[in-house]
Amino acid sequence: MANLSSPHIVIIGNPVDGFTHYGPFADWEAATDWVESLSDCDWWIAPLEPADPTPV
């Protein structure tokens, strides 16, 4: 797997039909390259943060 020093995920969908999350990708650019190869759809790219084991 690629170096995931700045991992990002791709979110595809909408509030009515639901969302699907894909990844992780090594960085924002890798996620963008992947999602731009898909057909026309609503999408966002978000950083993937590590889980905080301490509850808020």
Image: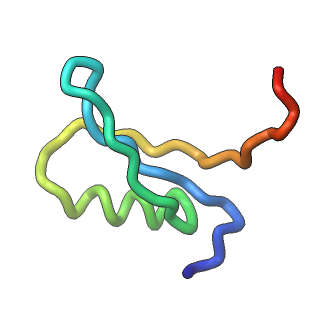
Classify residue 27 as left or right of residue 40: right
The residue sitting at the bottom extreme is 1
User: Which quarter of the rendering shows the C terminus?
Assistant: top right
The residue sitting at the right extreme is 54
Reply above or below: 22 against 53: below
Q: Residue at x 35, y 65 (%)?
A: 33
Q: Count of labels shown?
A: 0
Image spot of residue 45 (x, y percent): 45, 45
Classify residue 51 as left or right of residue 19: right
* Nearer to the camera, 30 or 7: 7
Image spot of residue 11 (x, y percent): 38, 42
Classify residue 9 as left or right of residue 32: right
The residue sitting at the left extreme is 39
* Nearer to the camera, 23 or 28: 23
Query: In the figure, residue 14 lies in which quadrant?
Result: top left
Image spot of residue 52 (x, y percent): 80, 39
Reply above or below: 32 against 56: below
User: Which quarter of the rendering shows the N terminus?
Assistant: bottom right
Image spot of residue 31 (x, y percent): 43, 60
Query: In the figure, residue 30 lies in which quadrant?
Result: bottom left
Q: Which residue is drawn at 18% across and 41% down?
A: 41
Structure colour scheme: rainbow
Q: Residue at x 45, y 59 (%)?
A: 23
* Nearer to the camera, 51 or 42: 51
Reply above or below: 41 against 27: above
